[in-house]
Image (cartoon, rainbow, N blue to C red):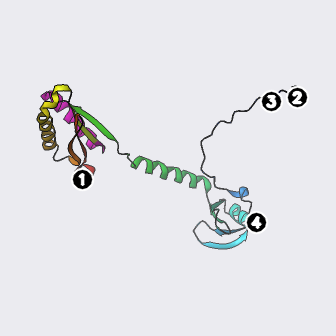
Amino acid sequence: MGPEQTPPRRLDIARPSQAPQTRVNHQIRIPRIRVIDEEGEQLGIMETRDALDLAQEKGLDLVEVAPNARPPVCRIMDHGRFKYEQSKKQKKAKAKSHQQRVKMIKFRPKTEEHDYDFKKKHIVEFLEAGDKVKVVVQFRGREMAYQDRGMRIVTRLLEDLDESALVVDPPRMEGNTLSLMLMPSKKQQK
């Protein structure tokens, strides 16, 4: 390469941020630490080398549990088992959590009986899954003159879903749409 040539630029690819790793055994560089044994008993402040020797005698690891404390707190434990239990807890918490989504069902003032039943069945399924449902009755052109038909559809739907839904937002006209928001009733959520 000549003096006017610059070396090729290396692309910095963004890597996903990782959680701060816990230091284990020889990764702990601080000379004095507070030590807790495997039963949870405090052994006090001691030299890191002595704590490592104690952990190795018991066939366990020295794991830093509170790195920001002064002095840092380390615990004698089986690190592999600890990581396994942490991952199980995270998976369990993730499985229990359900993000509530908003589903939308559209009706028209001329919606026939079969279509009404089909859409009502879907609304019930969404509510049973724990999601909110936005019901929309769309009016086009001259249909605006028949807003009472849209209101009848909404009233009938509320009567049919009396057991399984609570009204979050009551029916209201917004431009050329009549909409309301439903959420699962307390009986459904149990």
Compared to residue 51, the image places residue 183 above or below, namely: above
Q: Give neighbour class at mark 2: few <14, some 14-19, many 20+ (Cα, 10 Å).
A: few
Question: Measured from the top left, where is residue 67 in percent x and y?
Answer: 65, 62
The earlier-in-sequence mark between 4 and 2 is 2
Tag 3–tag 2 contact (CB < 8 Å)? no
- Majority secondary structure in the magenta region: helix
Instruction: Name which residue type carries label 4.
Output: Pro
Instruction: Name which residue type carries label 3.
Output: Pro
Is 162 within the magenta?
no
Q: Give neighbour class at mark 1: few <14, some 14-19, many 20+ (Cα, 10 Å).
A: few
Can I make out residue 111 in this image? no
Q: Give neighbour class at mark 3: few <14, some 14-19, many 20+ (Cα, 10 Å).
A: few
Q: Give neighbour class at mark 4: few <14, some 14-19, many 20+ (Cα, 10 Å).
A: few
Q: CA distance from mark 4 to mark 2?
A: 49 Å
The earlier-in-sequence mark between 3 and 1 is 3
4 vs 3, front mark: 3
Depth check: give the residue in front, 24 or 188: 188
Numbered tag placed on residue 186 in the rendering: 1
Tag 3–tag 1 contact (CB < 8 Å)? no
Residue pointed to by mark 3: 7
Residue pointed to by mark 2: 3
Question: Measured from the top left, where is residue 96 in percent x and y?
Answer: 39, 49
